[in-house]
Image (spheres, rainbow, N blue to C red):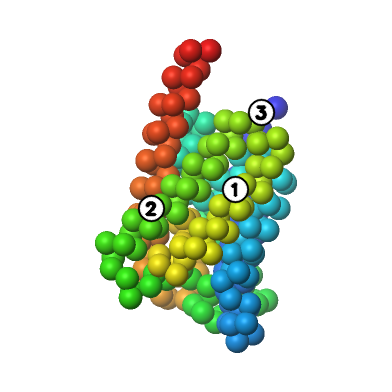
Amino acid sequence: MTHSNLQIFLVELIGTFILVVFATGSIVYDVQTGGTLGITFAAVAPFIALIIGIYSFGNISLAHFNPAVTIGFYITGHISKIQIAYYFVAEIIGALFGSLFVISFIGTEANLGANAPNHDFSLFLIFPIEVLASALLMAVIFTVVYTKGLKGFGGIAIGGIVGLDIFFLAFISGASMNPARALAPALFSGVLDNLWLYWTAPYVGTIIVAFLFRNKFHQRNRIL
């Protein structure tokens, strides 16, 4: 079944909203509780959000909820050039509404849950780690797509890699993997110093993987 660009726009907006509320709201709430929930809570929250979004909307929009993922899907030919605009605008608006929800109903601590790298590490490590986290996410997403949903476990796989990336890599790079998720809390908190990182590294990671998968699966399709 073919879905309209308006349907895609709406579900991408809603899915990104859910993701940002869970991903950033968990960080704000953890600070409010004195940090007792820790990185595990911050990793599990977006995992749950993605499970909700993917199983609810994946059959309509492929559940990007992330501009860097959208670029990856464009490279592999899953979406058209005009659809990039629908995805991007929906993802940014959804993220902004998500941060407004956090401000209104959860709190404003921790810069609204904005991503931040650990400057105890060199930028020459931080940047590649953020590229790696985003590349791993894109690789799992494409694996799910090309294996037709991993027999129903696609949402768990994609949410799981996001959670694992956060759990193991956030202490270095912040593990955003998502320019929209990084943008909204940074804008509303006014903490923009690190935004350049999350509007460059995730795209590098997803673009590299997209070209690898495009070549691999185009070759397979020619053989078949």
**Sooner in the amino-acid sequence: mark 2 or mark 1:** 2
Q: Quarter of the image holding residue 96? A: bottom right
> In what quadrant of the picture does the N terminus appear?
top right
Q: Which residue is mark 1?
A: 158
Q: Residue at x 57, y 30 (%)?
A: 146
Q: Is any atom of residue 210 visible in this view?
A: yes
User: Dot 1 surroundings within 10 Å: few (below 14), some, or many (20 or more)?
Assistant: many
Please state which amino acid type lies under the numbered disc 1: Ile
Please state which amino acid type lies under the numbered disc 2: Val
Question: Dot 3: what SS?
Answer: loop
Give residue 2's mark. 3
Query: Marks 1/3: CA distance?
Result: 23 Å
- In percent of width and height, residue 121 lies at 32, 71
Q: Is residue 139 above or below residue 42?
A: above
Give residue 131's mark. 2
Question: Dot 1: what SS?
Answer: helix
Q: Residue at x 47, y 66 (%)?
A: 170
The answer to whether residue 165 is left or right of residue 148 is: left
**Sooner in the amino-acid sequence: mark 1 or mark 3:** 3
Q: Nearer the viewer, mark 3 or mark 2?
A: 2
